[in-house]
Image: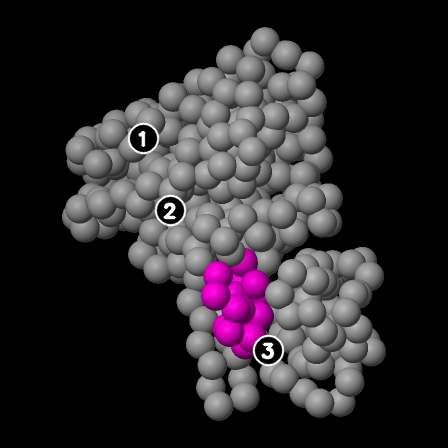
Amino acid sequence: MIVRSKAPLRLGLAGGGTDVSPYADLHGGSILNATINLFANTTIIPTDNGKIHLEAMDMEASETLDSSENLTPDGKLALLKGVYNRMVKDFIKKPLSFEMYTSVDAPAGSGLGSSSTLVVSIIGAFAEWQNIPLGEYDIAHLAYEIERVDLGLAGGRQDQYAATFGGFNFMEFYKDDKVIVNPLRIKQKYAAEIENNLVLFYMGTSRESAKIIEKQTANIEDSNIDALEATHRLKKQSTRMKEVILMGRMDEIGEVLHYGWESKKMMAAGISNPNIDKIYDTALANGATGGKISGAGGGGFFFFYCPRVSRHQLIKSLDQFGVEAQHYSFTRRGLYTYTLL
């Protein structure tokens, strides 16, 4: 038997940061995101040797442990161990023996939700293997609890839901971890136009999003007026982005992205830096009408909206910074699992 699972990474198009506590609990947050054809992959091979072999192939990290109901969630494989612990505790109720192999199509800290998407993928593999009846909301919320509560990792709530549901979604976040996912019925030609015009770049640097999110959280807790007002504007941005996409007002997308980026930079220190600012200014001077960093900020993936036929000029203009355009396409499907006997 071999069990496989895959979940898509996402681009956060608008509202990023409003899904983070305490803002979402106090004011309610909203985000518009879309999944792309980069994935977190999990393979489980059951064994009967009393061992648990864990291997993150993209990180070149592996461990072989004695089978147990609880593994110490440490090291590079902490996410894998944390998911195993919770699945055994809540559902399986006994130690398992297996080999698990994982990989993610983007580096950790790249801003595409890679860690949360991996957690969703691993939960999906266990649920497939053990026939655990979990719905989409169940899986996404469980992934959130494993990361934020069990492992104590700072972050928001959008990534787990994007990976589980897939497609274009407008998400609303409230207190008590309540989340409502609204799938958007976007015309195919509008989605195709966004895919053509939205150019994704990898900056070649990863960052620890948790540290930026901790600063953002502290600013909200301390009632930092600038940070709070900036977050309010980002929530409004998500609603406006939903409207312009659903109504096909393609030329306004860059403007909405620019509005969000200017607001996002005021949420916490470290979101931008002089190099990022220079890249952004160069992009605007070469056909882009707006853009943003995907994720908390500081590095990773950057994307720009380039209407009409300006994408090639933009790509050429950013060669000087050593950034590389990333080919991608939007996906309509979320978490997918299957078993081969």
Name the residue located 69 percent from the left edge and 69 percent from the top edge. 93
In front of the other: 321 or 16:
16
Q: CA distance from mark 3 to mark 2?
A: 28 Å
Q: Nearer the viewer, residue 255 or 152?
A: 152
Residue 244 lies, in percent from the top left, at 24, 30
Cβ atoms under marks 2 and 1 closer than 8 Å: no
Residue under label 3, please give it.
44
Query: Crowding near pointer 2: few (<14 within 10 Å), some, many (20+)?
Result: many
Q: What amino acid is found at the position of numbered circle 1 in the picture? A: Met
Can you identify the residue that label 1 sits on?
241
- Residue 55 is marked as none
State the image coordinates of residue 258 (x, y, percent, origin top left).
40, 25
Q: Nearer the viewer, residue 28 or 38?
A: 28
Q: Amino acid at mark 2?
A: Ala
Q: Is residue 283 left or right of residue 114?
A: left
Label number found at residue 34 = 2
Question: What residue sits 51% from the left and 46% below the top?
Answer: 159
Q: Amino acid at mark 3?
A: Ile
- Residue 337 visible to the viewer: yes
Question: Height in image: 94 above or below 251?
Answer: below
Question: What predominant SS class does the magenta segment belong to?
Answer: helix
Distance from Cα at disc 2 to Cα at disc 1: 12 Å
What range is drawn magenta here?
A: 120-134
Residue in view at x 47 percent, y 81 percent: 339
Name, please, the residue furthest toward the top: 225
Q: Quadrant of the N terminus?
A: bottom right
Compared across the picture, whether 128 is left or right of 153 comes to left
